[in-house]
Image (tube, rainbow, N blue to C red):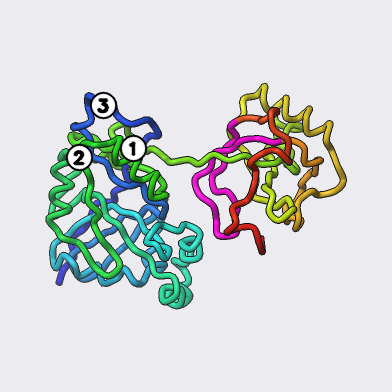
Amino acid sequence: MSSVPLPLVPPMLATPGPLPPAAQDDRWAYETKQDGQRVIVYLPGDGTLVLRARSGEVITDAYPELRPLAHALGATPAVLDGEVLALDARGRADFQSLQSRMGLAHSPARAARLAARVPVHLVLFDVPFLDAPLTGLPYAERRARLEGLRLVGPYWSTPRAVTGHGAEALRATREHGLEGLVCKRLDSVYEPGVRSRSWVKIRNLRGEDVVVGGWLPGGGRLAGLPGALLVGQRAGGRLVYTGRVGTGWSEAERAELAVLLRDRASTRCPFDPVPRVPGARWVRAELVGEVAYSTRTRSGLLRQPSWRRLRPDLTPEASSAELPDAFGHGS
């Protein structure tokens, strides 16, 4: 069986933004935003398969359980767009588990061993090529072609998209603890490698109070100013480290924080246990702030945290900066 040369297709990217206006709701499709690794799947039609990461790197050997997908379309050549996920016991994407599988493209033996313990699942959401380029077709037609392929298997699927009802779709992702929503114009063409306004991503962020226990100095023009804050939450009478926050300030806010941190400098780490953070500068745990974040790791660390504001109205004792029970021990 001979293979067909396939074009390299850098993935089309979404632009962060709000929901489309309600008056235009029926012009958009809505897909669940997945917390995984973006992949482009190349099926030449000869029984082989190549997976490329967003960077273009070939990562086929990292995910051996996806190799049977090579036979799903027979001799039909195709390029598919999707996301590789690791799922938790409730069927939700668990990026921390996926991290143990990523980066093993050059370690196929280890990847095969891990595949038995932490299998991945590929969700497919576009088809830029099917016998011929489809990038110039509108999303609605590409989506119909993709669903017509009926690509459902033990380690891959094609979740449905919803047309219209964007507010309800976003609310459903929040209620189910999912990462967010991707909104796609029904008439949008596939723009390889372009971050397009025809695709809009909305990330669900949670907000919580945290106690500042230290900081890391910035570099370059930020020398002497905080580059990141080290924050924690209480659990069982201890202040437990929950991560570092390095975004979300204006220049004025960063300068204000520098003064507040300097006034509270301490030689003693307030976190228990002491985290391994080279170069950390500790402060008395007196400042409370509010952060936004996407999810937590299994050990309780905040993922993708961003600073929202100081909470001068709260003291560490009177704040709601309490680590959830599930993360209160063994951190």
In the displayed structure, does residue 56 sit left or right of residue 288? Answer: left
Kind of residue at disc 2: Thr
Q: Which residue is mark 2?
A: 163
| SS type, badge 2 | strand
In the foreground, 274 or 74: 274
Q: Which residue is mark 1?
A: 194
The quarter of the displayed image where residue 70 is located: bottom left
Whole-percent x, y for residue 127 in the image: 21, 51
In the foreground, 55 or 167: 167
| SS type, badge 3 | helix
Residue found 20% across the figure and 70% down from its top? 71
Kind of residue at disc 3: Ala
Figure quadrant of the C terminus: bottom right
Mark positioned earlier in the residue sequence (3 or 1): 3
Residue found 83% across the figure and 35% down from its top? 264
Figure quadrant of the N terminus: bottom left
Q: Mark 2, residues whose alpha carbon is within 10 Å: few (<14), some, or many (≥20)?
A: some
Q: Work out whether residue 54 can be spotted.
A: no
Which residue reaches farthest top?
252
Residue found 40% across the figure and 49% down from its top? 178
In the displayed structure, does residue 304 sit left or right of residue 128? Answer: right
Residue segment shown in magenta: 288-308
Residue found 42% across the figure and 40% down from its top? 203
In the foreground, 241 or 281: 241
Mark linked to residue 323? none
